[in-house]
């Protein structure tokens, strides 16, 4: 069977770190098993917020990768204001933590660079790819955002090339993402964002969403939307499992980037209360961070009893992060508290599932994450005010841990494996 070619247009590609790169890295890894040959188009000189050399091993040996140069203003902006390193990764100082430099930078980012600061790559990419696609007989183009400016590449190619099939993959929403309201947009800029988003929804043959709620919302906006969640790679999980060790501490771990907008302050208050009023818990408890945690969050611990129970490992490679997941007793996942975020399913939840460890989750009520936790019997979801039930859950797991009875008992996680998710994607591609 002759392989069909698919062009994946993505900003994030190894050595980029973080969860955003892994979605299409893993699809590219397994698509050839379903008769599709991936070709990757990515910037030659990107400005990545995180680097992770360990992900390079997952790049298929014979994959074709084409690159062109990109101009983006972040390097210049970072010389003026270090907080730009945050918002190029979708993070923001908020409230009293927001300096006047941050306010100006965010306003410029939202109103001058629509939809984002990678928009200057759109025109040269369209010019280059129009010729490449026709010369190499590419049948399907995928654009993966954020950055959502990449969808404008797909939109323009769709207009220019007859019979081209285009899938717009939304790893996160566009105007419904939680930080959108923090961009300080003018009415005209907001209107432009929404017009471009609607054009993408209506012109793409398929819009992929990473959550059930996002897919439903996209359909309401005119998209032919299908949900394919993120997932876990069995090969990653197997390789990391052998390193698991028994800890002397009951360890609650957060793996990944934690910014102010997803800070579970009520959890810190509950943990601090347990440490101060339960000597048994205080003796054995450890809060572990493996990833980049906002400085403002870390400073919050300075005047609390919790500060003496924190093990902050800093940013780790993906492989190392998997090991730290295995060497934990409870795994923490947080989401934005507002109702519009209930469709966000952080990618790390699937790697959490693969460990078999219990998960404690925070976010809005009726979130898609809660649905997954219930289906897989893998933990409990709480809103940001639900302190009493949260305390009971933590103590229940702690008591089981002390007795040596805290077991891994997740169920029905096979559908979230990267292989099975890629098979689902291939079925969609075959029907285009």
Image (cartoon, rainbow, N blue to C red):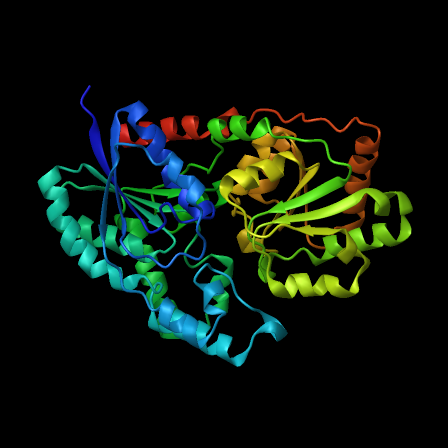
Q: Is residue 359 above or below residue 181?
A: above
Number of labelled discs?
0
| Left or right: residue 319 compared with residue 288 | left
Estimate the x, y position of residue 43 in percent, counting from the top left.
Answer: 28, 53
Q: Residue at x 56, y 37 (%)?
A: 322
Frontmost residue, 65 versus 123: 65
Q: Quadrant of residue 126?
A: bottom left
Across and down, in percent, residue 73 comes to: 34, 69
Q: Examine the rendering and report whether any part of residue 185 can be seen.
A: no
Nearer to me, 215 or 332: 332
Q: Is residue 266 left or right of residue 92?
A: right
Residue positioned most to the bottom: 100
**Quadrant in the picture for the N terminus:** top left
> Which residue corresponds to the image point at 26% horizontal and 64% vertical from the top-left?
120
Q: Does 402 sit left or right of 257 as displayed?
A: right
Using the rendered view, name the quadrant where residue 302 is placed: bottom right
Is residue 388 visible to the viewer in this orientation of the structure?
Answer: yes
**Quadrant in which the C terminus appears:** top left
Q: Residue furthest top?
A: 1
Which residue does the image show at 70% across and 58% down from the upper left? 265
As drawn, is 239 to the left or to the right of 313?
left
- Report x, y in % for residue 399: 84, 34
34, above or below 187, in the image = above
């Amino acid at each position: 069977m002759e392989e069909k070619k698919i062009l994946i247009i993505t900003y994030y590609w190894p050595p980029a770190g973080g969860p955003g790169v892994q979605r299409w890295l893993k699809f590219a890894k397994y698509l050839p098993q379903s008769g599709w040959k991936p070709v990757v188009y990515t910037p030659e000189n990107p400005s990545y917020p995180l680097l992770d050399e360990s992900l390079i091993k997952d790049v298929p040996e014979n994959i074709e990768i084409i690159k062109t140069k990109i101009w983006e203003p972040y390097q210049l902006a970072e010389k003026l204001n270090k907080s730009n390193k945050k918002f190029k990764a979708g993070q923001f100082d908020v409230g009293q933590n927001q300096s006047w430099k941050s306010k100006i930078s965010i306003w410029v980012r939202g109103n001058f660079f629509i939809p984002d600061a990678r928009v200057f790559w759109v025109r040269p990419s369209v010019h280059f790819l129009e010729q490449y696609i026709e010369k190499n007989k590419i049948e399907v183009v995928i654009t993966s955002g954020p950055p959502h400016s990449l969808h404008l590449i797909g939109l323009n190619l769709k207009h220019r090339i007859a019979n081209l099939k285009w899938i717009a993959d939304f790893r996160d929403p566009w105007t419904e993402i939680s930080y959108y309201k923090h961009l300080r947009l003018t009415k005209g800029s907001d209107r432009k964002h929404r017009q471009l988003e609607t054009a993408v929804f209506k012109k793409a043959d398929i819009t992929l969403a990473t959550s059930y709620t996002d897919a439903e919302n996209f359909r309401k906006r005119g998209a032919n939307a299908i949900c394919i969640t993120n997932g876990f790679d069995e090969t990653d999980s197997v390789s990391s499992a052998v390193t698991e060790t028994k800890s002397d501490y009951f360890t609650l771990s957060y793996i990944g980037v934690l910014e102010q907008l997803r800070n579970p302050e009520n959890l810190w208050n509950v943990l601090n209360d347990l440490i101060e009023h339960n000597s048994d818990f205080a003796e054995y408890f450890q809060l572990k961070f493996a990833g980049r945690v906002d400085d403002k969050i870390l400073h919050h611990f300075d005047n609390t009893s919790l500060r003496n129970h924190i093990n902050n490992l800093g940013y780790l490679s993906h492989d190392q992060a998997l090991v730290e997941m295995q060497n934990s007793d409870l795994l923490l996942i947080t989401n934005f508290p507002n109702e519009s975020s209930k469709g966000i399913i952080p990618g790390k939840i699937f790697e959490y599932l693969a460990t078999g460890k219990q998960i404690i989750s925070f976010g809005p009520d009726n979130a898609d994450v809660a649905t997954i936790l219930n289906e897989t019997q893998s933990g409990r979801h709480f809103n940001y005010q639900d302190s009493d039930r949260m305390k009971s859950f933590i103590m229940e797991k702690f008591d089981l841990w002390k007795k040596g009875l805290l077991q891994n008992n997740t169920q029905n996680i096979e559908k979230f494996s990267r292989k099975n998710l890629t098979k689902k994607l291939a079925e969609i591609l075959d029907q285009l």
